[in-house]
Image (cartoon, grey):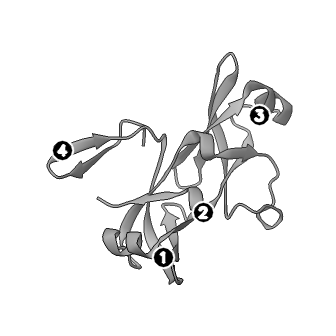
Amino acid sequence: MSSKAKEEKGGELMKISARNILAGTVTKVIKGAVNSEIDLTLKGGDKVAAIITNQSVEHLGLKEGSAAHAILKASWVIIGTDLDPKKISARNVLRGKIARIHQGAVNDEVTLTLGGGAEVTAILTRESTQALGLKQGGDASAAFKANSVILAVD
């Protein structure tokens, strides 16, 4: 879904600037003293972990089986090749194919397509894109921390 994604709220349509809006189903809720860990399963089976406050869990009405969206700014996403999820501190490592690279003078926009069809976009320096040897059609992973994920419901 693009940055033109809209959410119904109070009769008004809201637009957001975050590029990455991933639809899924809540498959786990673990409540702690202040925060909760939420697992969202995307179409195709990829999982996104989010850490949000217990108050937010209640406000959104999140429970296993409910639909939700994981929202991430493109600048919060790190792209890598041959990433081993067991050797990186980020909870979320999603593997995919590079769908497109939009080159800029300083930064590049790199978009991965995940197995279930969802897309994740990241902003990288042009130097990083070249150093990693990123090419359209190549394999890569998107990594991001669980506390960077914003959750939303319709």
Q: Is residue 4 left or right of residue 10?
A: right
Task: For marks 4 and 1, give the CA distance.
Answer: 30 Å
What residue sits right under mark 2 in the picture? 146
* Amino acid type of the residue tagged 3 in the rendering: Leu
User: Who comes first in sequence, dot 1 or dot 3?
Assistant: 1
Mark 1 touching mark 3, by CB under 8 A?
no
What residue sits right under mark 1 in the picture? 27
Q: Is residue 136 left or right of residue 73?
A: right
- Mark 3 or 2: in front is 2
Q: Could you classify mark 4 by the number of other residues whose Cα lies within 10 Å: few (under 14), some (14-19), or many (20 or more)?
A: few
What residue sits right under mark 3 in the picture? 134
Which residue occupies 79% across, 61% down?
A: 88
- Mark 4 or 1: in front is 4
* Amino acid type of the residue tagged 4 in the rendering: Glu
- Mark 1 or 2: in front is 2
Q: Which mark is residue 136?
A: none
Secondary structure under the numbered disc 4 in the rendered image: strand
The residue sitting at the left extreme is 11
Task: For marks 3 and 2, give the CA distance.
Answer: 25 Å
Task: For marks 1 and 3, give the CA distance.
Answer: 33 Å
Q: Position of residue 66 (x, y in %)?
A: 36, 72
Q: Nearer the viewer, residue 51 or 113?
A: 51
* Amino acid type of the residue tagged 2 in the rendering: Ala
Which residue occupies 66% across, 27% down?
A: 108
Above or below, 91 relative to 79: below
Q: Could you classify mark 1 by the number of other residues whose Cα lies within 10 Å: few (under 14), some (14-19), or many (20 or more)?
A: some
Q: Which mark is residue 12?
A: 4
* Amino acid type of the residue tagged 1 in the rendering: Thr
Task: For marks 4 and 2, give the CA distance.
Answer: 29 Å
